[in-house]
Amino acid sequence: MTQFVPQRQLRFYMTSVAPCPYLPGKTERKVFANLPFSEGAHVNDELTQAGFRRSQNIAYRPACEACDACVSVRLPVPEFAFSRSQRRILRRNEDLSRDLVEAEATTEQFDLLRRYLNNRHPEGGMAGMGWLDYVAMIEDTAVRTHLIEYRRASLDDGPGQLVGVCLTDLLSDGLSMVYSFYDPALEARSLGRFAILDHVRQAAAVNLPFVYLGYWVQGSRKMDYKADFRPMEKLTRLGWERIVQPAEGTDVG
C-alpha cells in the first residue's frame, strides 16, 4: 500500500500534566497535532493506524513518562466470530433501526447525550458539556466522519425514539468509533456492546478489515466491557499484534 505523505509537516505539541482519568493516583500527558483541513482525512488515516485518537480536529495519543498502560486496540473484522452472548445482544436489539446521517448536531441527540452523561459519567471530563461544545465535537472536523442513529420503531408517521448515537470515522482500512452514547434507561439492551458488534457487521458489509476501539487500559474498570471482544489486536513498538488472551483483571478502554 502506498504511504500517504502530507504536503506540510505536522507540528506536534504536548499537554501539561493532568490527573489520569483511568488509573487513580496516576497522571497523564498527551501529544497532539491539529489535523489539516486540506488533508485531514488522509492524515487521520495515518495517525489512527499509528495509535492516535481524534477529538474534533485534533489527533492525540498518550505520552506519559512513567506509564504505558494505554494501548491502542482494534478488532480484525474478517476473523471476528460472535460469541453466544453477543448473538443474544444482537437479537435483543434487532427491532432497532440504524440510520447513517451527516455529522450534524441536533437537539434530540444532545438531549440523549445529557441523559447519558448525567447517569453514567456525572463527574467525567465531559460532564459540563453544553450545546456549543456538542456542536463542535460533531461538526468541527475535516475528516470522513458520520453519525449512526439507532431508533426504536415509530408509533406514528414520525421517527422512532432515539436510543443510541455513534460518531464514527471512515478510514481507508476500517471504522473508528470516536464516541458513542445511548439511553441509560435501557440497560438491559447492552447498547454499548451492541454498538461495537453492529460496527463489526457494518465493516464486514463493505469489506473493511478493522474496527478501531480506542485504548486498552490495564487496571481501569471504566471500560472493561470491551475486554469481552475477541479476537483483538494491540499496537506495540513492533506494530499491530494479536492479543492472545488478556490477563485476568485486564480492561480495555
Image (spheres, rainbow, N blue to C red):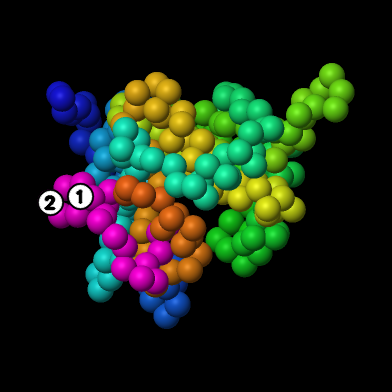
| Residue 54 falls left or right of residue 99 | left
- Number of labels in the image equals 2
Residue found 61% across the figure and 38% down from its top: 91
Circle 1: residue type: Glu
| Residue drawn at x 25%, y 73% as measured from the top left | 66
**Measured along the vertical axis of the image, is residue 142 above or below residue 92?**
above
Residue that carries the numbered disc 2 in the rendered image:
238
Q: Quadrant of the C terminus?
A: bottom left
Q: Residues within 10 Å of mark 2 (few under 14, many from 20)?
A: few
Determine which quarter of the picture holds residue 156: top right
Q: Is residue 178 left or right of residue 184?
A: left
- In what element is the residue under mark 1? strand
In the rendered image, residue 237, in percent from the top left (x then y), is placed at 15, 54
Residue contact between numbered discs 1 and 2, judged by CB atoms under 8 Å: yes
Residue lying at the far bottom in this picture: please name it: 25
Residue under the image location 40 percent in, 47 percent down: 213
The residues colored magenta run 233-253
- In the rendering, at what x and y percent does residue 236 appear? 19, 54
Between the C-alphas of marks 1 and 2, the distance is 8 Å
* Viewer-proximal residue among 17 and 201: 201
Q: Which label was assigned to residue 241?
A: 1
The crowd level at tag 1 (other Cα within 10 Å; few <14, some 14-19, many 20+) is some
Q: Residue furthest right?
A: 156
Q: Is residue 102 visible?
A: yes
For the N terminus, the quadrant is: top left
Badge nearest the viewer, 1 or 2? 1
Is 241 within the magenta? yes
Instruction: Tell me: 100 left or right of 68.
Output: right
What x and y, as percent, mark residue 63?
28, 61
